[in-house]
Amino acid sequence: MEASRDKSAQEPAHVLVVANETVGGQKLIDAIERRAARGPIRCTVVCPQNTPKRGFVVYDDSARSAARVRLELTLDRLREMGIEARGEVMDPDPYLATQDAIREWGADEIIVSTYVYPRSGWLRRDFVERIQKWSGLPVEHVVVDLREEPVKNVLVVASQTVGGRPLIEALERRASSSPHRFTVIVPPTSTEDEDAQTRLDATLDELRRAGLQVTGYVTEPDPFRSVMNTLSHHPADEIIISTLPSQKSRWMRGDLIGKVRKASGRPVEHVVFDPAADREPAGAGAA
């Protein structure tokens, strides 16, 4: 009987973490670490999939990929801290997502991470109070301001040129100067571009071998819409766009650099690479 009580006492508390765009925020990680210092825990991280705030067409696969990227980065960090962690991308409604998670996996307590009020739509809808009342569980609310994060976030946009040395070197220079986190998106050259994921994977592997904190996913073919939708999912302090030389690039002919700079309000760096210097181009007129 005594052995049974000892075993029960050592069972880790199950902490349900609910966060979306702030899921990788340092203040959230710190809150989980403080909780782990009080006793063993295991975490289930729920990341409700969001939708773009802007008036662009939603590419659902990209939205889900963005949520999955944020989630996996957070799970990796928790596991590095020695915390057992799993997670799911769930219903866009945080209240429904949290209810579903508790019904599915249970929880002993909840940590909710949001932006500051009134920027947070969750707080405007009284999500924290509603889920605490519904669940009857202890709920800790963590406010994250990604603008105060010590790590700079860079959105990288490239298609055929995604593995080019000029782009790789630009990212390596940034990473060597200060902490950076890179999100690479690859708009395929067309709906028939089956190699987009292969190009992305090879680039991510190379950057990770170099020690960079990087993730990425394939988006829809329209580069401008891809950028603006991604900015709705990911924080970005600056944007790097890699294209073919202007005479070969459809992106350049469409003034992608100027459009993104104007619409996003972020600094935009343009990197040029011509794959013809190393191999035959994969297709004419793409970027």
Image (cartoon, rainbow, N blue to C red):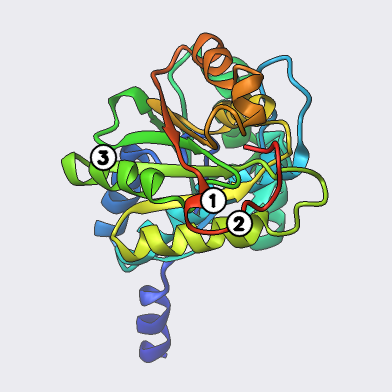
Residues at badges 3 and 1 in contact (C-beta under 8 Å)?
A: no
Residue 63 placed where, x, y %? 68, 39
Residue type for callout 3: Arg
Return the residue nearer the eye: 196 or 255: 255
Asked if residue 101 shows in the view, the reply is yes
Query: Mark 3 packing: few (<14 Cα in 10 Å), some, or many (20+)?
Result: some
* Distance between mark 3 and mark 2 Cα atoms: 29 Å
Residues at badges 3 and 2 in contact (C-beta under 8 Å)?
A: no
Instruction: Using residue 68 as the reference point, say whether residue 91 is left or right of it.
Output: right
| Residue visible at 24% across and 58% down in the picture | 37
Return the residue at label 3: 174
Return the residue nearer the eye: 22 or 206: 206
Q: Nearer the viewer, mark 3 or mark 1?
A: 1
Residue at the right extreme?
A: 192
Residue 209 placed where, x, y %? 34, 66
Residue 109 placed where, x, y %? 49, 50
Residues at badges 1 and 2 in contact (C-beta under 8 Å)?
A: yes
Q: Quadrant of the C terminus?
A: top right
Q: Which mark is residue 280?
A: 2
Q: Residue 228 sits in which quadrant? A: top right
* Distance between mark 1 and mark 2 Cα atoms: 5 Å
Residue 203 placed where, x, y %? 47, 57
* Distance between mark 3 and mark 1 Cα atoms: 26 Å
Q: Secondary structure at mark 3?
A: helix
Return the residue at label 1: 276
Q: Earlier in the sequence, mark 3 or mark 1?
A: 3
| Residue visible at 57% across and 32% down in the picture | 233
